[in-house]
Amino acid sequence: MKKKIKEKKPNFLIFEVGYTQKEWQSRTSVALIYPNTYQVGMSNLGLHILYREINRQDDFVCERVFFSATEHPSTSIRSVESNSLIQEFDIAAFCLSFEIDGFHMVEMLRRSQIPLWAEERRDDDPLVIMGGPCPTFNPEPWAPFVDAAVIGEGEEILVEIGKVWALSKGLPRVERITQLAEIEGLYIPSLYEPCQNEQGQYEGLIEYQSAPSLPISKRVIQNMSVHSGHMEIISSETEFGHMFLVEVARGCGRHCRFCMAGYAFRKPRVREVEEILKAISIGKSMGATQIGLVGAAVSDHPKIDELCRVIDEMDLNLSVASLRADNVSLTLLKKLAKSGQRTVTFAPETGSERMRSVINKGLDEADLLDASEKAIKAGMKHIRLYAMLGLPTEIDADIEALIELAKKIRQVMKKNHHAGKVILSVNPFIPKPFTPFEKMPLFNIKEIEKKIRILQKELPLYEGYEIKAESLRESWVQGILARGDRSLAKAIADCSERGYRNFAQAFRRCGLSKEKYEYQDLKEWKKLPWSHIDLGVKKEYFEEELKKAMKEEPTLPCFEGCRRCGVCE
């Protein structure tokens, strides 16, 4: 396809530094689609990395596409760079970071005139693929809408997909898609048929004759230094303004039992200081005034204090994605305060030592109190605590312990003559795939609401506390989608135009059993909707970790030479 860049630029380009524009000519064109707003999508570091890696290839052109809820449903969705329609690209690649964005993905397909269901697409329709955290953990709820799903990390696989798709041009669509199945880490849903027993329990996938044998192993970048881990574009219109994001590490080895990312992205990989500093220099040259360090636990980086000092010498402000209360330095806290940050966030997840043993948080109360005092002395005004309600084995005493923890931190603030607030951000626990708790039943909304009311009563605003909670209805939808199978696609399609708040009604309209996904315990299921995905962790390890959780026994973090979970084998 030959295509020239339109003379009139979309408005977003006016605010950007670092974007790429190419003539399409004979290049393979890729629409990199983030099914959320421009402001949210451009704050996602993964999108920047993929955009850069694809455009580094001379025979590819990659352009960004975002979702806008304010546009009329009949409005065509176009790319930022050349104002092109999604259906004009060779490949439409969706980045699915959050389950709720799956509804936007379906709506974007509907508005693009690309057939919604993969089986109905014609030879000249774009290849529709999805990648990101959600498809990596469980692609099944969205499988009927896509031709392929990337399992794992996408820096290299997207280029491989594009090359195979280009070389097979002219062949029937079915043959072209079948050829893609040979790419490591790529899952082709149309080559497998799901089956259930008479009780409606999922029993796995049946492989068609041309299908690669299951399971599908996740794609892992073996040498991260080959692929730069920083933003490609700075825009004043994003959530973070002129902040330049830099990846300092990928993955986590802490073994928190509720955390899907901690199991799916093992083992942790740390970027070298020299590489990080080079990225920071690039950001400054582009006009960035603030550096955002990204990683599962930024404070765990072995050279974090050195990075703080260099960023300070470069006269740049600093922000971090995450902190561990048991491993946060005064140097880091002082730099954050100097950069204008007034609230520091720690994630105890729960108030009691017993519950932190259940989830293997590896954090005790003394760590939290000490870190809070450090933060106050460094110049922070407020302390935010992340916590989950409804964790496995949770009892009333654990809620009381959370209240007491908040009060103790407030006392630390008073002791230091500090007038700030203790902000408690609470969300319901959602059992996720590839965790020891993956088979636990989903939370009961009324029970969570009751616990939130107790917190609000015991920690009132006028005494220096603030309680924040996300939408329980949205969390409920997220929980169902996270562990769903392909039958959910009917409900997703049904309410993509109505909004996810109509999801419960969509179950009835599509003849699905809401209870099957809601409160059902999956312990009796022999296979789970994500059983065909191999993230490297042994099934037996999850079972062992669940037993240790019930016994409140700890598990050590990753260490060199460890062979416990199977990833390093």
Image (cartoon, rainbow, N blue to C red):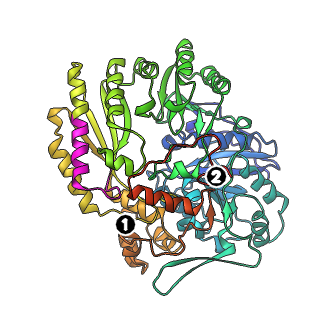
Q: Which residue is mark 1?
A: 502
Q: Main secondary structure of the magenta part?
A: helix
Q: Which residue is mark 2?
A: 567
Residue 540 occupies which quadrant of the picture?
Answer: bottom right
Q: Give left or right: position of 217 versus 253.
A: right
Does the stretch in magenta take in 390?
yes
| Element type at mark 1 | helix
Q: Which residues are magenta?
A: 388-407
Q: Give left or right: position of 282 versus 525.
A: right
Measured from the top left, where is residue 49 in percent x and y? 65, 40
Q: 225 or 157: nearer the eye?
A: 225
Q: Earlier in the sequence, mark 2 or mark 1?
A: 1
Which kind of residue does numbered mark 1 sit on?
A: Asn
| Element type at mark 2 | loop
Does the stretch in magenta take in 167?
no
Q: Which mark is residue 102?
A: none
